[in-house]
Amino acid sequence: MNSFGRIFRVTLFGESHGIQIGVVVDGCPAGIDLCEDDLSHDFARRRAGGRGTTPRIEPDLPRIVSGVFNGKTTGAPITIVFENTNTKSGDYTNLWNQPRPGHADLTGQRKYGKYNDPRGGGHFSGRITLGIVAAGVIAKKIISPLSIQAQLIEAGGSENITEAVEKAIEEKDSIGGVIECVCSNVQPTLGEPFFDSAEALISHMIFAVPATKGIEFGSGFAAARMKGSEHNDEIIDADGTTRTNYSAGINGGITNGNDIVFRVPIKPTSSIGIQQETYNFKSQSVQPLLIEGRHDACIALRIPVVIECATAIALADMALIAQQKTTVF
Amino acid sequence: MNSFGRIFRVTLFGESHGIQIGVVVDGCPAGIDLCEDDLSHDFARRRAGGRGTTPRIEPDLPRIVSGVFNGKTTGAPITIVFENTNTKSGDYTNLWNQPRPGHADLTGQRKYGKYNDPRGGGHFSGRITLGIVAAGVIAKKIISPLSIQAQLIEAGGSENITEAVEKAIEEKDSIGGVIECVCSNVQPTLGEPFFDSAEALISHMIFAVPATKGIEFGSGFAAARMKGSEHNDEIIDADGTTRTNYSAGINGGITNGNDIVFRVPIKPTSSIGIQQETYNFKSQSVQPLLIEGRHDACIALRIPVVIECATAIALADMALIAQQKTTVF
Amino acid sequence: MNSFGRIFRVTLFGESHGIQIGVVVDGCPAGIDLCEDDLSHDFARRRAGGRGTTPRIEPDLPRIVSGVFNGKTTGAPITIVFENTNTKSGDYTNLWNQPRPGHADLTGQRKYGKYNDPRGGGHFSGRITLGIVAAGVIAKKIISPLSIQAQLIEAGGSENITEAVEKAIEEKDSIGGVIECVCSNVQPTLGEPFFDSAEALISHMIFAVPATKGIEFGSGFAAARMKGSEHNDEIIDADGTTRTNYSAGINGGITNGNDIVFRVPIKPTSSIGIQQETYNFKSQSVQPLLIEGRHDACIALRIPVVIECATAIALADMALIAQQKTTVF
Amino acid sequence: MNSFGRIFRVTLFGESHGIQIGVVVDGCPAGIDLCEDDLSHDFARRRAGGRGTTPRIEPDLPRIVSGVFNGKTTGAPITIVFENTNTKSGDYTNLWNQPRPGHADLTGQRKYGKYNDPRGGGHFSGRITLGIVAAGVIAKKIISPLSIQAQLIEAGGSENITEAVEKAIEEKDSIGGVIECVCSNVQPTLGEPFFDSAEALISHMIFAVPATKGIEFGSGFAAARMKGSEHNDEIIDADGTTRTNYSAGINGGITNGNDIVFRVPIKPTSSIGIQQETYNFKSQSVQPLLIEGRHDACIALRIPVVIECATAIALADMALIAQQKTTVF
């Protein structure tokens, strides 16, 4: 299913080299200011162009084609589309014969058979995350003053990210990284026990972002080495502020008002400039493979804003649901 | 929402000290063998009683009250209930005045107000995971021969789990741990790109299990320190087997036939026998708190089977959906 | 799927001759008064016993087993179960060989194969509507002061219902009827354009009730013979009151504050005391069939309260959703 | 929610005078032939232009912008958009002051406040049903050889539709009608007991179509005047064929293989050329209102194909779900 959310519902569509990609955002309250310019800041953060990112620079010009009138959301579904302009499609027979390691070439073929769209990754392309960013910009407006900040805190095993990226470029290789995301001014009562816990919904969205390999909230994996007497966050005042925040602002699946903090490892870009060996289905043997073109040496550089926006989508849905759930009326 | 799944749909209900807890499993195909005894193996694994677990030993006797006839599932919703027998409820005023750190006492109060059921954790109780295990046993039958094995690989920062647990008991403290889960014989084509990626659905279920603090698939957090040339899993034969399995059997959100491998950190039990300090809403000041009774020194000991069953639920839903999605007909 | 609703979510389970039938109601706000006695009035209206209804009189004693504490809903899922006591099951081979006309015997067999539970109609039994009534009683509390009244306005083609029923009993035959349902004090803004129109959600629930053959809102089928100049409901004051109410209180899928009025035809009970002819799969020929036992001569007598409750469920879901949808915040 | 379906999921967006309207169809199997021309037949049937329909003739040229590659569906979401070209928007202050009777002007204002898009009906416009038709064309391919035929069997209370339409045009009034829809070659086992009965899902979709006032399956309202001995459809051969078909091919919510037959009344077009009286919120009194422009004298003429397509969407979802539900594997 290419949709997420119960009330604030986001639907993605499009392929890397298709005519349009886009997103439909349903369930957005009426009366929110929205215009194309509102998207430009987060789009710029996602865009390629810096060192370590691909030179495919598309304008990524969004068009809001429904759901907005006189600069305000109307309550009807908001659709934002992007034309694909940089879509010289070539011959994809090679991909079929020798699927690239780390990519979805083979799983796409297995799932959709010969009908899978191979052009530039088709619907698996990271370009589809433009829709996540667009929906996230709207979501951020809904959840304000809750604010979300994600940043790359480490890449290639190094805190000196620039250096690590330069080295990867030089080696024609790629590197991964770790993104940390902090949500502040979080209202209590978001999320539910069990299936719709705040962690469950946030992680669901985070794993909708390609290249994510994990998530840990608060203490995360370190919790496994801690004692209860250390890990329990002692409440220190009447608004629920805790001395420590190992629980990442969530108890029993429900936000407690402290910051939601989590970290996400990003794998190194699968496309690299170094020769690899992998199975060739035509020759029926393992063969060398060299992927042409230029690549993101560190895709993790572009993902923090996508993580922010994915998180905002999950929180907006929880916030809209929480408006009616908690008290008798 | 206390439900999960599009086709194989699981609904949990009940409170720790209520009359019954249980689970409704909708969308299960007809004709699967099912009786109460089928649950006993996984229930025994979840049960308290060993060193490091609570002495509250309930029989956990399941009753299948709908959806099964002559020992076979009928296609109608399957309901499995458990009577709560060990439910001496006392005075919960203290909990209200001084919510326990690490528990959902305060978030429950904030979300549901004075109507929150405080008895033994109410609907937040880990006891509700009995329903996850029951549904998971059914799910495992659906996805067979796919098999899932989860085990505690580390506790209290030590691989010598027994020793770590004994030390925690002695100190009246608690410890966390790491559970590793391996899914073998996985059919390709499970999961979808983006929102319903195999990782998204599995993680959604994993974070429905109380005390989980994170999840990492395959390389996980280590991916952040790897290069693409190391991380890419080279395909070595026609069935899609890869030389390494850093992708954890999933590319582009879709299973590739290799094992799905992930690890989950479990926090130390929040209830400990050591005095803590936390806010008392009656006295309006931080006060000492000593939680009475005996506790699980290492709740992680009981969770591997819950992780298995949560995973089975996610995979069963994907497997039933995958029956009709991938080919033209 | 045996569930309905986005926020107020109702899940049914059970079979006529199984151990328990019941309902899970998720998404109910905390703090609503609820006890078993609250169900007795509507249960009495649904119960058999009067002229024209079956003599199977079960106590229908509900047990609230979760979601209520100290007489108030807690915000956790509410489960209400009913033991089946009157369940002498006999030999169902005949049903398999010669499915009863008008019943789900054959469709159940085709869908679920030999695993279909044939006892007393299994999961297809009208007895399962007890769960709809129980959920509806809760829903009515949520939507109050909106009130719903359904009544049988015609049976057997006659407005003298008693007479028509007596005649049917005498003839060992059965008769249908028409139920009219009026919802008053309806708040504006419930429902959505298109897929979740108020009519769509109400009709979805109405067709979840066995034996319903149609639904018409306001002018209904008569609209086909009307002119626009007659049919348009002229607004006569500032609160949106209309002179006529052919639109049944709904425009563009959204309630306008006038009464929601609809009518539902109920088919004559399928089980009758008269010999019928129908296919016998064993003899591979059409054969006479006489259904033993006593039957509801007019099942429509028992259905008004089910229609009310089904409507309340749809409206409660709309009302909870409408709390956050219409205004910017 | 502007979406429908569990597996075959349709999302509508757009406004009458916005930039684009369209539809996203998710969950469509890969490998189905699809091009813009496939839509032209059903689009022509929906289009205005004949006697009794508006002279707003837009080309309705669809663009398939995602989900299709080399003329086949790829398994990714299919998006079809339509540019709005005939969108001279004027001054809508009048609409705000004096909402038109029978339209959604007032409910739209009440629900979305001053943010409601008033231009040409906004998101409430019948034009949005283009998306239903587009999705329905795809759905028809999925359910083939099941075929659906809907036709207008009566308008203005007359079987002589042409005459009735001419009279309405002459009188500057509008008339309603009745559409009958027959689904043939229906496979057994579609639909579920209770909430997802075939009738529930079909009616849900039918009431997503503006101007529908009711639905009756098979015997429908006539069932209320029939006896069980007449109404029961006797099975006459081994494939489940029945002598009569009052049940409309559905028992217990599940298709039995006989034709699904239902009728839908359509109200007379709300926009008429005759002066009406209705509340003016500015003058705070009932005032005359004359709607300018030309109108559909009988919108029912254009709706049969929309009914067909709405039905196809419901059946496609049931058919995809039914692929995996009924047998053990």
Image: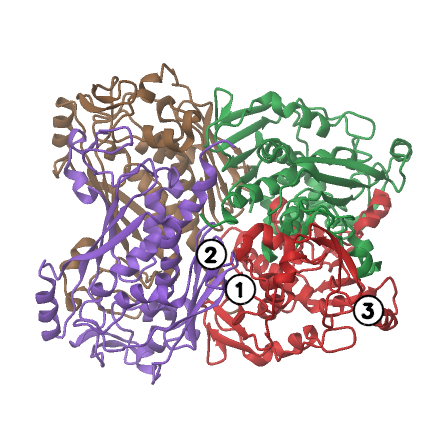
Chain colours: A purple, B brown, C green, D red
Looking at the image, do the residues carrying marks 3 and 2 touch, with CB atoms under 8 Å apart?
Answer: no
Within 10 Å of disc 1 (Cα), the crowding (few <14, some 14-19, many 20+) is many
Within 10 Å of disc 3 (Cα), the crowding (few <14, some 14-19, many 20+) is some
Residue with the most extreme front position: D283
Cα gap from disc 1 to disc 3, whole angstroms: 32 Å
* Residue assigned mark 3: D172
Residue A325, how many percent across, how many down? 46, 37
**Frontmost residue, A213 versus D227:** A213
Residue D196, how many percent across, how many down? 60, 49
Q: Do we see residue D287 in this rendering? A: yes
- N-terminal-most mark, 1 or 3: 1
* Residue assigned mark 2: B321
Q: Amino acid at mark 3?
A: Lys
Identify the element where label 3 is drawn. loop
**Is residue A284 rendered to the left or right of residue C240?**
left
**Is residue B100 rendered to the left or right of residue B163?**
right
Residue D151, how many percent across, how many down? 76, 68
Q: Amino acid at mark 2?
A: Ile
Instruction: Determine the chain carrying the residue at label 1.
Output: D
Find residue B191 and report its image quarter. Answer: bottom left
- Identified at 25% across, 50% down, the residue is A215
* Residue assigned mark 1: D13
Identify the element where label 1 is drawn. strand
Identify the element where label 2 is drawn. helix
Residue C211, how many percent across, how many down? 73, 43
Mark nearer the viewer, 3 or 2: 3
**Frontmost residue, A178 versus A61:** A61
Cα gap from disc 3 to disc 2, whole angstroms: 52 Å
**Is residue A76 rendered to the left or right of residue D152?**
left
